[in-house]
């Protein structure tokens, strides 16, 4: 068991080396203490980008099927699974093996039988991709790892959404550090057939125009969503904002044929728009 935490930091339930477990907003969560953003947020606030979850919460209903592509340790997988309930399902994909193992552990700790986790990347075509060997004990931005440029490491399968042959898909969350367009290309048939709501990270300026062009080609209306990493009403009520004004840069994508009113979000009308 962990020692008492310093003042202002929520206590740990358990820790071993660089892995720590705490009682968090959506249940028990194990995370890496050296993770610069995800782990640090759980350590200080017992939640991570909760405003992203508030968006997803509006999109999900009991009984829905949702994909969490680039699930990391399950910060959003867990509340997504609770929201869709036992009649729904969440499919969560994560290519970094040790991060995936924490995702699976957090799903197990939450007793979430409606989640299917897979140690895999998701892309435009089936195959393999190299995930570099990382010393997680040394710390870093593990959630920011961009794949596709490594020749050495661990070969990990690449899946496509279309090969899943889903009968239902209502919401697709995609956060894959620059590979978002690849995921969409491998999901074209599914998106055309099932018309899910898409919630897509878009934080690479050099890839933004191509990504937005792809989304427009799928006949979606697009809106910027820029949630802050720090929330003043965080679960531990910790007022210390270590992330300053840092935001996540995401795009909410709604099928154009749906009659949905979106308020307080800027619609994207040109693929060349920047945030």
Image: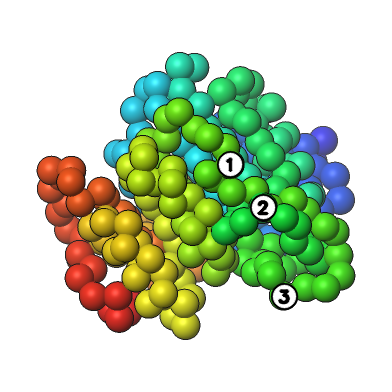
Label pair 2/3, CB-CB below 8 angstroms: no
Residue drawn at x 82%, y 57% is 155
Q: Quadrant of residue 105?
A: top right
Q: Position of residue 78 (x, y in %)?
A: 54, 35
Query: In the depicted view, which residue is nearer to us: 269 or 86?
Result: 269
Query: In the depicted view, which residue is nearer to us: 197 or 41?
Result: 197
CA–CA distance between discs 2 and 3?
A: 17 Å
Q: Name the quadrant of the N terminus.
A: top right
Label 1: element kind = helix
Residue carrying label 1: 163
Q: Position of residue 35 (x, y in %)?
A: 69, 61
Instruction: Mark yes or no: residue 225 visible.
Output: no
Considering only order in the chain, which callout, 3 or 1, is on the residue closer to the N terminus? 3
Q: Mark 1, residues whose alpha carbon is within 10 Å: few (<14), some, or many (≥20)? A: few
Tag in front: 2 or 3: 2
Residue drawn at x 86%, y 51% is 17
Q: Mark 3, residues whose alpha carbon is within 10 Å: few (<14), some, or many (≥20)? A: few
Label 3: element kind = loop
Residue drawn at x 46%, y 23% is 88
CA–CA distance between discs 1 and 3?
A: 24 Å
Q: Which mark is residue 126?
A: 2
Q: Name the quadrant of the C terminus.
A: bottom left
Q: Quadrant of residue 251?
A: bottom left
Q: Which mark is residue 176?
A: none
């Amino acid at each position: 068991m962990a020692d008492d935490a310093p003042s202002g930091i929520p206590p740990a339930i358990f820790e071993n080396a660089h892995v720590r477990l705490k009682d968090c907003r959506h249940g028990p969560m194990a995370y890496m203490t050296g993770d610069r953003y995800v782990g640090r947020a759980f350590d200080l606030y017992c939640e991570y980008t909760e405003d992203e979850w508030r968006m997803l919460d509006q999109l999900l209903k009991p009984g829905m099927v949702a994909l969490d592509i680039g699930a990391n340790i399950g910060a959003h997988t867990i509340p997504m699974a609770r929201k869709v309930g036992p009649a729904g399902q969440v499919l969560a994909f994560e290519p970094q093996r040790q991060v995936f193992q924490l995702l699976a552990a957090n799903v197990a700790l939450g007793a979430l039988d409606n989640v299917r986790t897979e140690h895999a990347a998701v892309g435009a075509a089936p195959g393999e991709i190299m995930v570099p060997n990382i010393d997680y004990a040394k710390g870093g931005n593990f959630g920011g790892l961009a794949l596709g440029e490594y020749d050495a490491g661990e070969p990990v399968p690449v899946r496509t959404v279309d090969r899943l042959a889903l009968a239902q898909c209502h919401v697709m969350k995609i956060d894959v550090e620059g590979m978002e367009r690849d995921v969409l290309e491998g999901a074209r048939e599914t998106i055309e057939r099932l018309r899910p709501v898409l919630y897509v990270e878009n934080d690479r300026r050099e890839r933004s125009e191509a990504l937005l062009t792809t989304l427009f080609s799928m006949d979606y209306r697009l809106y910027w969503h820029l949630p802050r990493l720090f929330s003043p009403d965080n679960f531990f009520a910790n007022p210390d904002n270590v992330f300053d004004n840092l935001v996540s840069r995401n795009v909410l994508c709604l099928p154009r044929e749906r009659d949905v009113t979106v308020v307080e979000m800027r619609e994207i009308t040109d693929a060349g728009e920047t945030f």
